[in-house]
Image: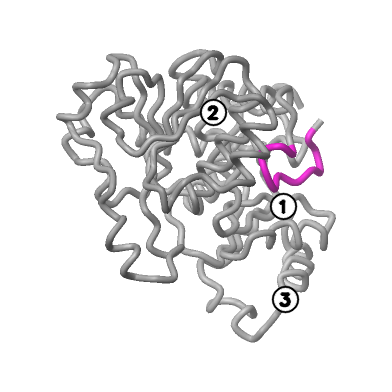
Amino acid sequence: MLKGRSLLEPMDFTMDEFEEVFTLAEEIIAEPERFRRVCDGKILATLFYEPSTRTRFSFEAAMLRLGGQVIGFSEPGASSVAKGESIADTIRTVACYSDIAVIRHPKEGAPRVAASSTDMPVINAGDGGHQHPTQTLTDLLTIRCERGSFSNLAVGVCGDLKFGRTVHSLIKALSRYEGVRFVLISPEELRIPDYVRKGDLVKNGVEFKEVERMQEVLCELDVLYMTRIQRERFFNEADYIRLKDSYILDAEKMKLAKETMMVMHPLPRVTEIAVDVDDDPRAYYFKQAKYGMYVRMALIMSLLGLQGEEQR
């Protein structure tokens, strides 16, 4: 059972526990009416110290669709954080009013500090360039529903692999499935960090290669996971400008890819996927955003120990 647990990074859950969440998400997708009141009387706190659209809205929509309520802030200036309140004190206070909390923070490890300061379940919605486990649940549910299996996939991840927390979490999670291999596509300056390369890929014997040209490898991929070059992670504006358009996927490049390849993106996109790809049946990034709401509904229910209405 996941009741009372927190989710701070993908490895907090076993593969069987992932399966539990995915199975529940698929039940919600199939019969949403069964779940529309299961969180009646429950309150979700959303503590967003960084800007967010999809993650915050999908968590809020998830709780509302389950019949619960939402409190929180979308920027630290709207809270006592602006007065110097610590994360530990904030979460202790919020726990007086809510049943479960979601936190996004620019500092790596901040959600872990929050979770260690309360008995309430805490969900990491992204901490700096570190982890983004609920995006990983979203990504895995998308692949599972659209392809049916994770085994023996060739997964290309492209763009900002150094600071891209969605990439770090996805690699960590997918590395546990049999036969998955990675193609890491990035400029040299934005290659995957050593702690991911050595700690998740080399250590676990996962096959991977690093390349700089997307066109060379599109033909071999089952999934292409695009990411934006993140201006907010750069200390030097000149470096961002130099690298921001390193990779642009467009309709012409899509001709090189398999007819069955999935194009995914955690969003928001800037220039890295041209709008002429949007109508390609291989473009899954907006479907992916909707799967994110369903998997977060399943996660909230699981951490609160709730079931569908006829199962009560």
In the displayed structure, 112 sits above or below 257; it is below
The residue that mark 1 highlights is 122
Horizontal arrangement in the rendering, residue 113 relative to residue 237 (left or right): right
Horizontal arrangement in the rendering, residue 310 relative to residue 238 (left or right): right
Magenta residues span: 2-12
- Residue 46, image x and y in percent? 60, 59
Q: Quadrant of residue 10?
A: top right
Q: Per the image, is 10 magenta?
A: yes
The residue that mark 3 highlights is 86
Q: How much space separates mark 2 and mark 3, taking CA atoms?
A: 34 Å
Q: Which mark is residue 41?
A: none
Quick one: label 1 or label 3, which is nearer the N terminus? 3
Q: Between residue 28 and residue 116, name the one nearer to us.
A: 116
- Residue 21, image x and y in percent? 66, 28
**Quadrant (top left/top right/bottom left/bottom right) for the C terminus:** top right
Quick one: label 2 or label 3, which is nearer the N terminus? 3
Q: Residue at x 53, y 50 (%)?
A: 60
Callout 2 touching callout 1 (CB < 8 Å) = no
Residue type pointed to by label 2: Leu
Q: Per the image, is 112 magenta?
A: no
- Residue 28, image x and y in percent? 56, 26
Q: Between residue 262 and residue 172, name the one nearer to us.
A: 172
For this orientation, the residue located farthest to the bottom is 83
